[in-house]
Image (cartoon, rainbow, N blue to C red):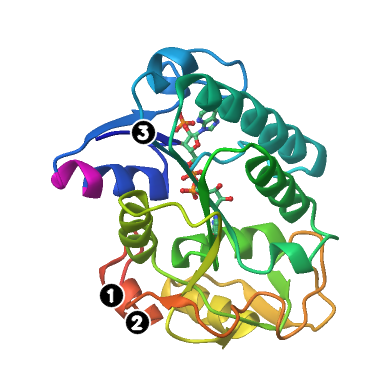
Amino acid sequence: MKIVVIGGTGLIGSKTVERLRKKGHEVLAASPNSGVNTITGEGLTETLTGAQVVIDLANSPSFEDKAVMEFFETSGRNLLSAEKWAGVKHHIALSIVGAERLPNSGYLRAKMVQERLIKDSGIPYTIVHSTQFFEFLGGIAQSATVGDTVPLPSAYFQPIASDDVADIMAEVALSTPINGTIEIAGPEPVRMSDLVARFLKATNDPRKVIADPHARYFGTELEDGSLVPGDHPRIGAQRFEDWFSHASPWPH
Ligand SMILES: NC(=O)c1ccc[n+]([C@@H]2O[C@H](COP(=O)([O-])OP(=O)(O)OC[C@H]3O[C@@H](n4cnc5c(N)ncnc54)[C@H](OP(=O)(O)O)[C@@H]3O)[C@@H](O)[C@H]2O)c1
């Protein structure tokens, strides 16, 4: 089966491509570097010709509110219209647990627009809502840093390892579209401020995390239930310690 992975060179994209190739599928890792650009439209029709499944794992180069909205809106429109032309049978996208609950975040508003375009496209689809990746803990710390401190919400989240996400994305690609959303999460709910503090300590980072219920996470305040999944998520196997023990490039 021909499968196109948009953003196939990224964190989740490259791992998903590897898993599907191992199963013997013809998998194209599409990205601007390989001549496929969902913003300009470059290379889209050629790449999608003959494809049955498209997995959209692209991400915006900028997380600034206006830029990220433009990215997911333009990318979604161009990609879905090229998929319609090519007769793609299953569109899969990776979005975020709780995105619909947090309209004050510009990034999450943009993900909701991406989801709306998919639902309105008429192409059979599966949307995967994931919690934050462990690999994103450094990015969370970076986005909240003020001098030597990192004020962060004390609300719960339930992060997942990128390897577990990629296992599930590859499985979804080989399944029938559900025209709905599934949720995936890591095995443990934990307070964001606690886990980021553990991560910084484990990486010998001197910044000090300050737990503050009113601190913003990408533009929005969080409640305990904002970023945790509902009743029946699929659960990734790796706990923080499992992931950290083989993650790189941090010294440990
Ligand atoms: N971070 C999290 O915790 C989290 C949680 C849940 C869901 N997600 C979602 O997961 C998805 C994948 O995230 P990730 O961290 O794996 O992304 P990533 O590592 O930043 O990779 C982004 C990919 O998008 C490609 N890309 C950028 N602009 C493009 C364009 N104009 N046309 C085609 N491809 C383009 C990049 O290609 P180049 O390498 O050539 O630039 C790269 O392959 C995102 O949609 C994100 O919203 C993230």
Which element type, helix, strand or loop, lies under badge 2? helix
Residue drawn at x 80%, y 84% as measured from the top left: 213
Residue at mark 3 to residue at mark 1: CA–CA distance: 38 Å
* Disc number placed over residue 52 in the picture, else none: 3
Question: Badges 2 and 1: C-beta atoms under 8 Å apart?
Answer: yes
Q: Secondary structure at mark 3?
A: loop
Above or below for 146 versus 3: below
Q: Residue at x 42, y 83 (%)?
A: 187
Badge 1 marks a residue whose secondary structure is helix
* Amino acid on which disc 3 is placed: Gln
At x 74%, y 59%, the residue is 218
- Residue kind at label 1, given as amino acid type: Ser
The residue to which callout 2 is attached is 241
Name the residue carrying label 1: 245
Residue 197: horizontal and vertical position, in percent?
Answer: 56, 80
| Image-based side of 116 in relation to 135, left or right | right
Compare marks 3 and 1 and give the one earlier in the sequence. Answer: 3
Q: Which residues are magenta?
A: 19-23
| Rendered residue at 39%/67% (across/down) | 161
Relative image position of residue 111 (x, y in whole percent): 68, 50
Q: 89 or 114: which is nearer to us?
A: 89
Q: CA distance from mark 2 to mark 1?
A: 6 Å
